[in-house]
Image: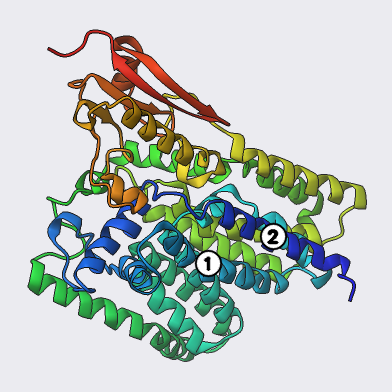
Amino acid sequence: MPIRKQNIPILLSYSIVITLFIVTINNSYFYDTIYYGSKLAEYYYITNLSFRLPDSIECGYFPTFGMYIALIWKVLGRDLVSSHLAMLPFIIGIIWQLERLIRKFVPRGTSGLALLIILIDPTLLSQMTLVSPDVLLIFFFILGLNSVLENKRILISIAIIFLFLIHMRGIIISFCILLIDIHVNISFSNSIKKVIIDIIKRSIIYLPAFFIFLAFSYYHYITKGWILFHYDSPWAELFQKVGFKRIIYNIGIIGWRIIDFGRIGIWIVFFILLFRLRKDILKSKKTLLLFFIFSVLLILLTASLVWAKNLLAHRYLLPVYLCFSLLCANILFNHPVDFILKRTLIYVWIIILISGNFWVYPDRIDKGWDSTLAHLPYFNMRKQAIEYLDEQEINYENVQSFYPNTTIIDYLDLNFDNRSFSNFNDSCDYVIYSNVFNIKDEDYDLIKTQYVIIKHFNRGLVYLDICKKIIPKR
């Protein structure tokens, strides 16, 4: 049976994701996935899923993702392949649910193309190559959104429960879904009393997740003496409250995140369409609904992030990226656009978005390396660096590095190697540095002036150097 032309982009979408999955199935844990997917899982693996966590790795909310990975290890074995296989059902689920969501807003003949151009977001693809809880968050977010639009109450409740269980951001996303649910499924043309009663009835769908949260919080308080956060937490610095000027600065960073890694191409397409079709856009109920969904997510997710010192990772805004892309695709494929202009805009969208995987800023500017495919060469170079140190018989106690390369090697590679590099403080003869590390300016200057490169690895846009101190320690 011949493949229909409109199905080619769908097959291409699955092919891209599966190919990336196969190519990266042996990649190590990286950045925050080390904690969420490795350290937590290791604890549950060796304690047979003992629920209570030690304070040193206690995050304050449900450790569901770590328990899930540990369970997969129990069944399939404790290795990187098993860890990545744990992600596969949710990776496929994202494509499936995203396709269903797109078909609600884009004509069926072009929904496959819309799926492809939305799916190639660098941050989404990058997270799909990692053992990341954000993969699960995005799956249950899209499932919840689809269920709201289809008014499937049981599925809404299930999606919300898992959003609550996976991460604190899932609670914020759940509240966004509740507001969208109220907007979509409650008629505000009724009397105020009827509207209030309908909202209360609708909110019951969300109560199971809320009661689970309350039960966990009560248990956590009576066993630990605190809820969600404590001042001795390893992440305490990230949650420091900031003043008004820093909030404005953080809002600016959020704006940068939204257009970063090629997403500015989507905004260019959007503003061109807005200029050409501004009258038609306001007449479309589906377009206005998508604008409402995008606005709710943008406002609430931004509000939940800008109050703290360092909660501005690219991946935190994935629901915003996806819904804005869907909004733009809805306008592009539903409204009357000249054929040549439409084709040009699609090319602009695809080319600039793909180019986002090659956006690497100067070394002194922090980058979201876990949110772009540019980071992929790092894993092999890191292994080559370890092999070089072993060949040269360099003692790891005399080697320093930077996060995430200072974690015990076993937590990264699941290879039972309990050696590690200490955090850089200029007290050892050797240092491993990569542009993937996002280090402080003073540390960067020190390495460039007081160390000499003895081994250089470079591939793509990533490099890794093993450096030796010019004047060895005494």
The x and y percentages for residue 90 are 52, 69
Residue at image position (50%, 46%) is 371
The residue under label 1 is which amino acid type?
Leu
**Residue assigned mark 1:** 88
Label 2: element kind:
helix
Image quadrant of residue 337? Answer: bottom right
Q: Quadrant of the N terminus?
A: bottom right
Q: Nearer the viewer, residue 59 or 236?
A: 59
Q: Residues within 10 Å of mark 2 (few under 14, many from 20)?
A: few
Mark seen at residue 190:
none
The x and y percentages for residue 196 are 43, 86
Q: Nearer the viewer, residue 464 or 234?
A: 464
The residue under label 2 is which amino acid type?
Ser
Residue at image position (53%, 71%) is 89
**Residue 163 shows in this picture:** yes
Picture layout, residue 60 above or below residue 349: below
Along the polypeptide, which appears first: circle 1 or circle 2? 2
**Is residue 219 toward the left or the right of residue 402 in the image?**
left
**Residue assigned mark 2:** 15
Q: Residues within 10 Å of mark 1 (few under 14, many from 20)?
A: some
Residue at image position (40%, 70%) is 76
Q: Nearer the viewer, residue 105 or 466?
A: 466
**Is residue 431 toward the left or the right of residue 154 in the image?**
left
